[in-house]
Amino acid sequence: MELNELKLVSASNIIKLRTEKGLTQAELGAMLNYSDKTISKWERGEAIPDAYVLTQLAEIFGVSVDFILSSHDKWEKPKENEVEQVSYSVERIIAIAVVGTLTAFLITFVTLWLMNIVEWRLFLFALSAAILVYMILICVFKRTRHLQYVIALFVASLFLIVYFTLPTANPWQLFLILVPAEVLVFLACNLRIRKHAKEKKTEKT
């Protein structure tokens, strides 16, 4: 099988497997730590993933590498409009969930206020809960490109809750712990990013 034919065969199989799994190009790219432009390039038959990425794709789709590289049907050009529509729906679902979480805490605050109980610290819990919901959903929908910043923000919100809810005087020393905690978050997240950055560089060469 010639290289150009192999590109078209792999493109056809990637399109079929991705759509059957209900993933957009952006979502598949996030799972591989590649951009949606790279996925689109593969699906247009302009390039073929390297051996390591092919094993990742085989694992994601539950097939063998040989299946991806073997002819099963004709190559079809990806439908960009459908991809954009699905991606937009996912963003809306995430937005509704986050706003719904904040609204629930606001309703609780107003209810307590009507009972002459003003508990402004509820907004700290609301912020933390909204970030947690957002973090969970971007993981579920494979939108993890900025996950490290979301995790760092969630950790900071937890420190704020502890700081303002402790019965004793507010210990500012807590924020001395926050600094190394945030550094650990970024270091842990960047381990995987750097690994894939090297793979992308290898693929280009």
Image: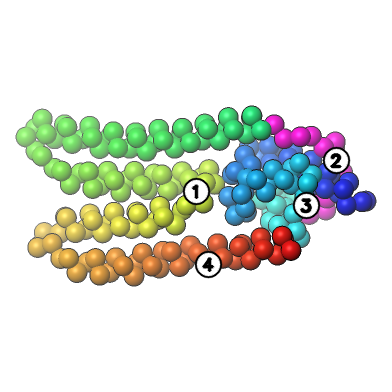
Question: Residue 9 appears in which quarter of the rendering?
Answer: top right
Q: Position of residue 58 (x, y in %)?
A: 72, 52
Q: Main secondary structure of the magenta part?
A: loop
Q: Is residue 134 left or right of residue 89?
A: left
Q: CA distance from mark 4 to mark 3?
A: 26 Å
| Residue positioned 50% across, 48% down in the render | 139
- Seen as rendered, the residue at the extreme right is 1
Name the front one of labels 1 and 3: 3
Say which residue label 2 marks: 72
Say which residue label 4 marks: 191
Q: Amino acid at mark 2?
A: His
Marks 2/3 in contact by CB < 8 Å: the verdict is: no
Q: CA distance from mark 2 to mark 3?
A: 17 Å
Q: Is residue 148 left or right of residue 107?
A: right
Does residue 53 sit above or below 133 in this rendering? below
Of callouts 2 and 3, which one flags the residue occurring earlier in the amino acid sequence?
3
Q: Does the rendering let one see residue 189? A: yes
| Neighbour tally class for label 2: few under 14, some 14-19, many 20 plus, Cα within 10 Å | few
| Residue positioned 46% across, 32% down in the render | 92
Please state which of residues 67 and 25 is positioned toward the viewer in this rendering.
25
Say which residue label 1 marks: 139
Say which residue label 3 marks: 48
Q: Amino acid at mark 1?
A: Cys
